[in-house]
Image: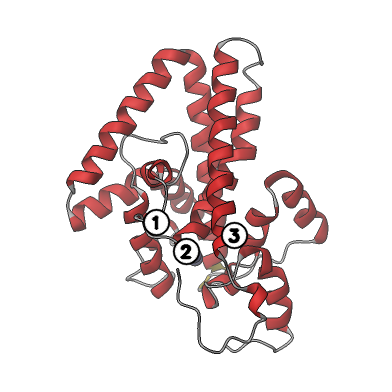
Amino acid sequence: MTTQPLTSPFPAEYMVTEFDALGYSRRCMVGTAVLVGGYALAIAQIIPPIALPLMVLLVLPRWMINVHELLHIYDEQQLNRFICLMGVSPVPLSVISLSYGEIRTQHFAHHAAPAHASDPDLYHIQGNWGQAIFNAFTSPEQSALRWINRHGLTPQLAFDLAIKLMVLVALAVLGGSLFIWFWLSLRLVYGLGDLAFFRLVHHQRGEYGTFSLPWPLWAVQLSTLVFGATVTNATLNHDVHHQNPYLAARALPAAAIAHNGGMAAD
Ligand SMILES: [Zn+2]
Ligand SMILES: [Zn+2]
């Protein structure tokens, strides 16, 4: 678990707990069941194909944030093998993508120097909008290739990539043309989520840093309705998360208010 400071400016109930962690991993598994179940139902023509992108829109951002929250709590030995294998998405986005252990190491390097030269995520934060969009939409492959280039391909990662290849082939064979729409939906939603969670919160008004997203109330409410509170809280208060990674996502809005009121240490 991310180390908690001996003295925290926040109440103890703001800290992330084992109970939070179990909720994050449970919600990942429920989301996977919804997505894979929905794909099977669409193949069986029980639900229309248009239901698939809607399911992806509801499930994938939740998976992404739940996995992000888990990164700050569990290492790969403490988390179930399925989430470790799949990493950034419950259905492989690519045959070339990282597993949980590498994503965790990379995320901690991002926290150590966000949007700086040593940040492994800088490539999908920096540049003009065209570059940022291209890099966000190709980040599963780029992050994996950059990692392998730097650290090499371990037997475990190679094994995980082989499994992802088999899963993708099986899903494509089972779904036919439906798979193309399913996979494109996953890539589209993932790319937009990546833009929100890296570019929008680390590059604003020409400056690099770590920022909040001060959305109007209606947008916060709409986001909470569609994507859930964890996605909304963790994305909009990314600055508070970076300063206090031991805080649970549920507590970030209150921590942000306390921080702006001068309660929290800088
Ligand atoms: Zn983080
Ligand atoms: Zn960040």
Q: Quadrant of residue 48?
A: top right
Is residue 71 placed above or below 113 in the rendered structure? above
| Crowd around label 1: few <14 · some 14–19 · many ≥20 (10 Å) | few
135 or 236, which is in the foreground?
A: 236
Residue furthest to the top? 45
Residue identified by numbered label 2: 73
**Residue 75 rendering spot, x and y as whole percentages:** 38, 60
Q: In which quarter of the image is the C terminus?
A: bottom right
Q: Residue at x 59, y 16 (%)?
A: 42
Mark 1 or mark 3: whose residue is earlier in sequence = 3
| Crowd around label 2: few <14 · some 14–19 · many ≥20 (10 Å) | many
- On the question of residue 113 being in view, the answer is no
Q: Which colour scheme is used?
A: secondary structure
21 or 241, which is in the foreground?
A: 21
CB atoms at circles 2 and 3 under 8 Å apart?
yes
Q: Which mark is residue 20?
A: 3
CB atoms at circles 1 and 2 under 8 Å apart?
yes
Q: Which residue is drawn at 43% across and 52% down?
A: 131
Q: How far apart are marks 1 and 2 (CA)?
A: 9 Å
| Crowd around label 3: few <14 · some 14–19 · many ≥20 (10 Å) | some
Q: In which quarter of the image is residue 200?
A: bottom right
Q: Dot 1 lies on which element?
A: loop
Q: Dot 3 lies on which element?
A: helix
**Residue 2 rendering spot, x and y as whole percentages:** 45, 71
Is residue 47 placed above or below 10 in the rendered structure? above
Residue identified by numbered label 1: 78
Mark 1 or mark 2: whose residue is earlier in sequence = 2
Question: As shown in the figure, which amino acid type bears the numbered disc 1?
Answer: Gln
CB atoms at circles 1 and 3 under 8 Å apart?
no
Question: As shown in the figure, which amino acid type bears the numbered disc 2?
Answer: Ile
**Residue 191 rendering spot, x and y as whole percentages:** 50, 44
Mark 2 or mark 3: whose residue is earlier in sequence = 3
